[in-house]
Image: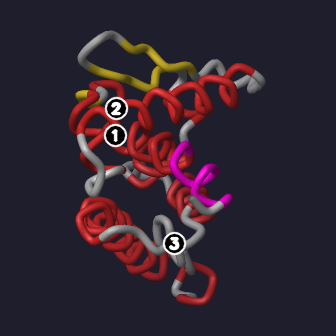
Amino acid sequence: MRKWSLLLYPLLLAAALALVGPKGSRRDALAELLWPDRAEPQARSSLRQALTAVRTALGSDETGLHLAADAESVRLLGPVEHVDIHAFDRLADSAVPEEQARACDLYGGDLLEGVSLESATDRWFEGYAAAFRRRALALVETLSGVGGDPAAAAC
């Protein structure tokens, strides 16, 4: 196993949990998403290891984010404004141009841009990436209409 993959999977797990929101996800779905080429027992073991790494990372963070898990599901809980994608959604939905501009500031490019994933995993994340890309482009159009300067409205 490559050293970078030990770091990648907890990050992908945290990203997946942030994307699905407070409803969370079933453990078996997460294991299949992140380790589609592994047998179920091995994928579940890898999921437990990644959950431990995410808990450790969140434990040292002062955002108030934490994992809630039971035998069937896992959720990322805490203040939604501390998760960039949720803050982006909230600010993008605002009718206030300054808040929409702050949403553009949060959009730093495509979700997981440059990360190479298994095809099924890539397709799952790409669905979210495409949705955020469309929202960012719509914001650019909206903001360029408000100020008249498209360069000032770049996401």
Residue 44: assigned label: 2
Left or right relative to 3: residue 40: left
Amino acid type assigned to the residue bearing label 2 in the image: Arg
Task: Return the residue at label 1.
Answer: 43
Which residue occupies 28% across, 20% down? 73
Q: Which residue is mark 3?
A: 115
Residue 68 position, x and y percent, is 43, 14
Please say whether residue 126 is one of the residues in the magenta stretch: no
Q: Tell me which segment is drawn in magenta.
A: 3-10
- Tell me residue 38's x, y (percent): 30, 50
Q: Secondary structure at mark 1?
A: helix
Under tag 2, what secondary structure? helix
Q: What's the distance in space between the residues labelled 1 and 3, CA to CA?
A: 20 Å
Question: Callout 2 environment at 10 Å: few (<14), some (14 to 19), or many (20+)?
Answer: some
Asked whether, in this view, residue 25 is left or right of residue 84, the answer is left
Identity, as a three-letter code, of the amino acid under mark 3 = Val
Give the position of the N terminus as an image quadrant: bottom right
Q: Residues within 10 Å of mark 1 (few under 14, many from 20)?
A: many
Image quarter of the C terminus: bottom right
Rendered view: 73 above or below 36: above
Kind of residue sitting beneath label 1: Ala
Q: Image quadrant of residue 117?
A: bottom left
